Structures are given as C-alpha cells and as structure tokens.
Amino acid sequence: MAPRSRRGGPTVHPGAWWLWALGLGTAATRTTNPLLLGLLVAVSAYVVAARRTAAPWSRSYAAFVKLGLAVLVIRLVFAVVLGSPIPGTHIVVTLPEVPLPHWAQGIRIGGQVTAEGLVFALYDGLKLATLLICVGAANALANPARLLKSLPGALYETGVAVVVALTFAPHLIADVQRLRAARRLRGRPDRGLRGLLQVGLPVLEGALERSVALAAAMDARGFGRTADVPPAVRRTTTALTLSGLLGVCAGTYGLLTAEGGVYGLPLLLSGLAAALAGLRLGGRRSPRTRYRPDVWGARAWMVAGSGIATAALLAVCAAYDPAALRPGVVPLTAPTLPLLPAAAVLLGLLPAFVTSAPEESA
Amino acid sequence: MIRFENVSVTYDGAYEPAVQDIDFTVPEGELTLLVGPSGTGKSTVLGAVSGLVPHFTGGTLRGRVTVAGRDTRTHKPRELADVVGTVGQDPLSHFVTDTVEDELAYGMESLGLAPDVMRRRVEETLDLLGLNELRDRPIATLSGGQQQRVAIGSVLTPHPKVLVLDEPTSALDPAAAEEVLAVLQRLVHDLGTTVLMAEHRLERVVHYADRVVLLPSSGARPVLGTPPEVMAVSPVYPPVVDLGRLAGWSPLPLTIRDARRSAGELRERLADIAPVNGRLPHGDTSPRKDPNPRPEVPAPRRFLRRRTTRTAPDTSTPHPAAAVTALAVHRDRVEALRHVELTVTPGETVALMGRNGAGKSTLLAALVGLVEPTRGSVRVGGAVPHRAAPRDLVQRVGLVPQEPRDLLYADTVAAECAAADRDAGAAEGSCRALVSELLPGVGDDTHPRDLSEGQRLALALAVVLTARPPLLLLDEPTRGLDYAAKARLVSILRALAAEGHAIVLATHDVELAAEIAHRVVVLADGEVVADGPTADVVVASPSFAPQVTKVLAPQRWLTVSQVREALSS
C-alpha cells in the first residue's frame, strides 16, 4: 500500500473546520426546535464519521457527545428540582416542597413539575448540547495544535502554552486510569471514589514531571530563540500595541454608550489596525519559520462557507418565521420540521462531499 | 568538538558533587560511549553537553564545557540547539507535536530555516531513518522502536554537529535496537556527526564505539580509552567481554566475530563437557515437572502464521500456577492476543519475548486481571483473575509493572512497607524484612522517588512479594538496570523459583532470559510462535541468541556462568 501524504490529497485548513463547526453551533443557538437541533447533530456526526482520521484527537467527538448529554441531563434535573419559570397546567408529578424562609422568596425546591417546564428545559438543554457537540466536531476534524501554525509569530509562544495545557488533560486521564489499575496490583479496590482520591497525588506528580521534561526537550530544540531587532522597531512595536489596545477599549466604550456612536466605530477600527500592525512587527523578534503551512484553498472556502451559510440562513429564518424555529411550550404543541431551515441545516453536509476522505489506516 | 575542562557538577541540596574531575575531549566524527554503573552521573555529563545542566536542572557547574567552540556557560540550551541534538531516555517526553512529519520539522521551525530547506531535509531524514511509511502517523500510535527513530530524526533535521543520546536502545527489542544503532553508525560514518551516548546494554553498543569514557564510581575520575582498553578494567562489561576475560583472550574481543576467532581452543576444551541439553547450570532450580526434555520446537517462523499450538497438558501437576487457554484479547479494535495457550507450573521461570507491541504486556495484564479476555480463559491458581476481588488476587498473583513507580504511593519506604503489609494481610514487618533483603542499606525515611531505577524495582518487587503470590509476573524488569543490579535481580529471582514461585517475565533482554528462564515463549503479532526450553528456542533464533551462544555455537552454552562452572569442575 502506497501511503499517501496527509497533504497529498489536499487537506482542508483547520481554521475552515472550526469556522464550519462554529457556524453550525451558531445555527443551533438560533432555534429550540428539537427536530432542527437533532438534524444539526446528525449533520455534524455524519461529517465527522466520514472525514475524521485515525488520530487520537479524532476520538474527542464521542467525549463531547457524552458531555452534551450530561449537560442535558443536568438541565432536566434542575428543572425538576428547582422548578421552572414556565407556567404550566399539565402536572407530571408533585415533589414534596422544601419550606424556605421568607427571604428566599422566588426560589423553591421541589413542588410541582409540569410537562411544559420539562419540555422547555429539554429544548434549552438540547440547544446547549448541540453547541457542545459542534465544538467536538471541530476538535475531531482539526487538531487544535495545527491551528497554531496559523497564529501570528508574536503570539506563537502563548499559543504553545495553551496547547500544552490542553494536552495536559488527556494525559492526566490516561495516568489516572493506569494508576487506578495499578491499585489492583496492590490488592486495593480499583473502583470507587477513594481509589480515585488516593491516586491523585502520584498522578499530579507524574504530570508535573512530564511537563518539566517536555519543557526541557523544547528548550533543547530551540524553542524560544529570539532574533535581534533594532531598538527602534522594538519601541514602535510597543507603541503600536499599546495605542491599538487603548483605541479598541475606547472604541468599544464609544459604541456601547448611547451618545458615542459617532467616534466609536472609527476609533475601534483604527485601534484594531494598530494592534494588528504591532503584532506583525512583534513577529520579527521570533525567527520561526513554518513547515508546509496549511493553504486556504477552494475547499476551505466551501467548508467554511457551508457553516457560515447555515448560520446566516437560520438567523434569517428565525427573523421571518420565529414560530417554526421556537415551537411553543405553552400551550404544548408538537414541533414540526420547517422545510426551509431544514434545507439550510443540510447545507452543513457539504464538507462531507467536497473534501477528500482520510486514508484508512490499520 | 565536545570539550570538558575539569568539570564538576553539584546539584542544589546535594552534599557531594554528582560528577567531578571530568576532563576529556570528543573529537569530531567519533562515536563515544559513556559507560558506568547506575548513579555515577552519566546523565549529568550528557546534560552538560546540551546545556540543560545547569541551565535547566539548576545546580552549580564548575569548570568549562564547550561544544563546537561555544561555552555552555554563556549559551543557553536553545542557543545550542543548532549544534547539539539531544534525545533523552524516554522518547515520549521528547515530542512536542502530534505527527511524525511535524515532529521532524519542529526543530528547524524553531531555528528559522527556510521552508524549502525544511522540506528537503524532512524528506532526506524520512529516508535515512526509514520513516517514510509513517510520515502521517500520530506519534502516540507508533511502537517503541519507531518512536525512538522519530526522536533521533527530530534532532537530526537541523543538522547538528553533535548528537547526545541517553540509553537509546534500553526500551527496544533486539531487532529495533539494531535498527537504531545502524542509523547512528551511518550518521557517524557518512555525515561525520559526533555522537556521545550512554547505554547500559553494552552487548548491543560497545562494538560500535570509537572510544569509551568510563565513570567507574560516583565522583571518581573518568577513564578514557579505546573500547578494548576500557573494557579490560571496567566494572560493567558485556557477556562477550566476560567470556574473553574468563578465557584470558588478548586482545579482548568486543564483537562476536572477534570472539569466535579466538574461541577455537575454548570450544575444544568445552567439547567434552557440553551442557546437558543446554540447561540447568544452577543446581536445583529445575522446574518440578518435566523429567524428560521437551520435544524439539521449531524456530519462530514468520510465514507460518497460525501454528498448531503445543498444549502439552502436564498431568503430573494438578494445579498449574497459571493456565491460559485459547486466549484472545481485543483492545481498541486491535487484536492484541489471538489464541494464546500457556501453562506455567510452580517453580518454573518463563520468559516472554517478542518485538515491541507483540502482546507481551497484554498477556501479563490478562494474567493479573487488568484486561478482560475477549475469548478463551485465564486461570491463576484456580481463580479467574479479572473477576477475583483485588484482595484475594494479590495472594495468588503479583505483577511488577514496567514502571515500578506506578505501584508506589507513599512518601517514605517505611510507609510503603506498612501499607503493603496491610494490603496483603501479612504480619507487620514482613515487607520491611523483604526490602532489607533485596535492598540493603536503604533508610526507612527515603522517598521512593529518590531511589535509583534498580532500587525502585527492588522496592516494588518487595511490595508485591509481601503477599507471597505463587505466581510472580515482571514486565521488562531490566530496563535501566546496570549489570550489578541485574545480577542481584537474577539471584533473587532464582531463589524465588527455587522456593516454588512460578515466574513469568516479559523482556527484551536476551541475556537475562538466558540466565534465568527455563522456558522461552516467543510472541509475534499476538500469537505464540515458539514455546520451548530456553536453549532450544534461543539457540535457533539469531536475534534472541545470547552472546555466549553465538560465540560458542554449535555448542549450546547460554551464559558465562555456565561456562565458568564447567571449566572449574
């Protein structure tokens, strides 16, 4: 079997996958229709199943799905225990209510659980879960570390710190599993909370040691080398970055206050421009170069475009036909699948057809 | 190229310098081997070359270290990155990116090389190290040997003048180790790279070295010389040198080839006293069963995928220490083991061998109940390991994992022992007694983290043995051990086997297997491809044969101690 390079069949810029996934996520925030949300999840799942590689980070989709389900369950439990602001008539069950002192007015624990409240919580939780699942799709399709390559040089080192921190968690989980297994070898129960607590310290020690070893390796391989830059450039960088940030702050303030509408936008834009110029100039201090950076090509446009289009179309639909996207809960009605928004969601399937399939590896 | 001038290093909080009076030069284009027992400061010397000592580790460095004319005092590790490439003991902690190709490019990116140069060098390095097939693979999915090659490749791409390697072959199976060493030799011969390397497994590396620097003991002056000169006086030496010293050969042979040339006379002397079917030089350590030699076993043959398995049901022992029948284990959709049959009787020592990733650790994990069999059954002393309660299980089987540290939780040796007594339900002080026996001279309040590799292994072994399990499993026990620690381990294991413990060890160390194993089981791709008495299996296989066997072939000697006993009797 001739191995084909990852970039042999043109792969898509990781940023495009993130834009696509965030587009789907934005679309999810525009609706509470469970059918549309389910469709969104199905679309993301299909694309992930069709286009993910065998790499370890590809498994994160399942983890995010579980996280989404957990959020949904927690939302429902809260609705049951703490009640819901939704007035409802269909009482499902009445829990014993905990009497609370008068200063805690407006809060109740227990009491009536209405079908309307439950359905509302379900829709709401489903929306959040869908959002999370979309982020999971981005994680599974685009390695976060590869996004680093697209970061401006001045921010690279900060980016590395973030990525190292992100990989810390999976390592920690693997360590916990290994050490809990080792407890069995000592004749101690390997399940339960106590087991988890007792391995805590060794796990943290191990993780710290690994981080130190990684830092040493990175240092020995030239991480953080700096190039000499003339003092004038250095000063200009500082001035540009500082004034740019001030401009952004003042501009935002102007936009948000009622009477500052005139100077707000131009100030914000010029501040942004100055800050970006500062970043670009700051990049000169870092001699880094990039090996085969990802190219933003036609496929990347299509992938990102399909996500953005889904988000935009759903926003437009939400403005024109709010009833279809937010099915009523009082009175309870069965949600229907509005055709136009459903078609918009299906646009998100585009990446599964325009990108190349990953190499099947053993 | 590398110059140490009167260097001594004292770490913070230490009373004595870790190394002192280091004074030597490594000329350009030479492969220099740094040898010595554990704890004599080999890693410190290596770290001083890349500048990680003292810039990263702290401590005080006296004297001067220069690499390619750059003083490490004024140059931080990152500023030496273009002349020195360093690979540490654990390749996994070396990797910064996720895929092979990115990892190879990482160092060059940091140095700011032009994109077309990077592209060319990555392709060259992929070819040089035979990694082209793996270029897109996530590093986490590679085997140990592949990871080691990627680690070496990742420091090669910036074209360093100096390569510093800390135990590059310790974790590798014999074939993978050969692969890595062949690459190093090619770099030295073809590219003129200067290599400084520390390694415990001298039998694998010493004949590649141009010069040897010996750190004889902690704080002692280093001894320099050609490999034969240094090996003549060194406290650590490979079996072939041991044999040469025993036979009084001069010059001392370092390679099998040289030794065979000198060995004619020795072979004649030994011809009349050939070992009984190549086994049992150690008195009564024979397994209690098996009065007749086992039938001849075919050598591992690659093309023969599914050999009919030799079950050899031994009716003489009603309770085997472990019985594995038709075991299959799937892990993450990968078939880690397929149709494995294994019976271990009390008093028997079995060595599991095979390449990295062949399923050795999985088999041990199945024996101790850490993984559930997908098919087939595992019985340990009559119990099903993965169903047994942990408390019961420790009375039947104990595993010392590859990383003994995983077993240790407490912050002093005494606390660890007390906990082990409680866990095993043993009388108070029984673990401590074992520790004193295995590990004399270790204080009660020492932190397990401060112990050396060998000491930590001994402590973990003591903890496991506290419950007196009839079946003892060891996963790669000699990784990072020097010859002295290995010899101690060998005598401990022999004594245990003589007491009736069944021992199963997974190892790449052919010399260890030759020393203690009664039986060798070779796994490949999750299947048993050979199972038979040590002499039969290892003699038949060129990659698993110990050095003494190769030197004295066609006679079937396995270890130097065997030869020594035969000559003295």
Image (spheres, helix red, strand yellow):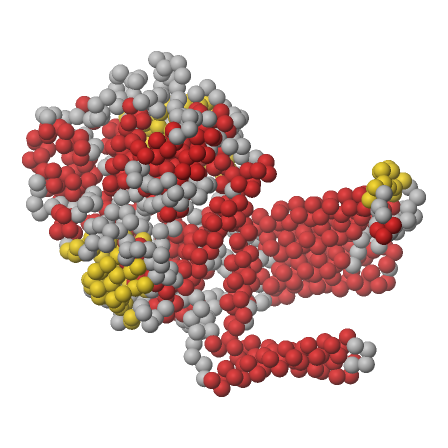
The residue lying at 35 percent from left, 45 percent from top is B451
Instruction: Say above or below: A150 vs B459.
Output: below
The answer to whether one can see residue B309 in this image is no
Q: Is residue B5 left or right of residue B148?
A: left
The residue lying at 54 percent from left, 65 percent from top is A159
Among the 4 quarters of the image, the one containing residue B30: bottom left
Instruction: Say above or below: B380 vs B54.
Output: above
Instruction: Say above or below: B250 vs A224.
Output: above
Task: State the count of labels.
Answer: 0
Q: Is residue B93 left or right of residue B254?
A: right
The residue lying at 47 percent from left, 56 percent from top is A211
Task: Name the residue nearer the viewer: B162 or B543.
Answer: B162
Instruction: Say above or below: B1 vs A74.
Output: below
Position in image of residue B398 (x %, y %): 42, 30
Among the 4 quarters of the image, the one containing residue B441: top left
Position in image of residue B412 (x %, y %): 41, 42
Position in image of residue A319 (x %, y %): 84, 63
Position in image of residue B553 (x %, y %): 17, 34
The residue lying at 52 percent from left, 77 percent from top is A282
The answer to whether one can see residue A197 in this image is yes
Q: Is residue B271 left or right of residue A64?
A: left
Task: Name the residue nearer the viewer: A60 or B302.
Answer: A60
Among the 4 quarters of the image, the one containing residue A13: bottom right
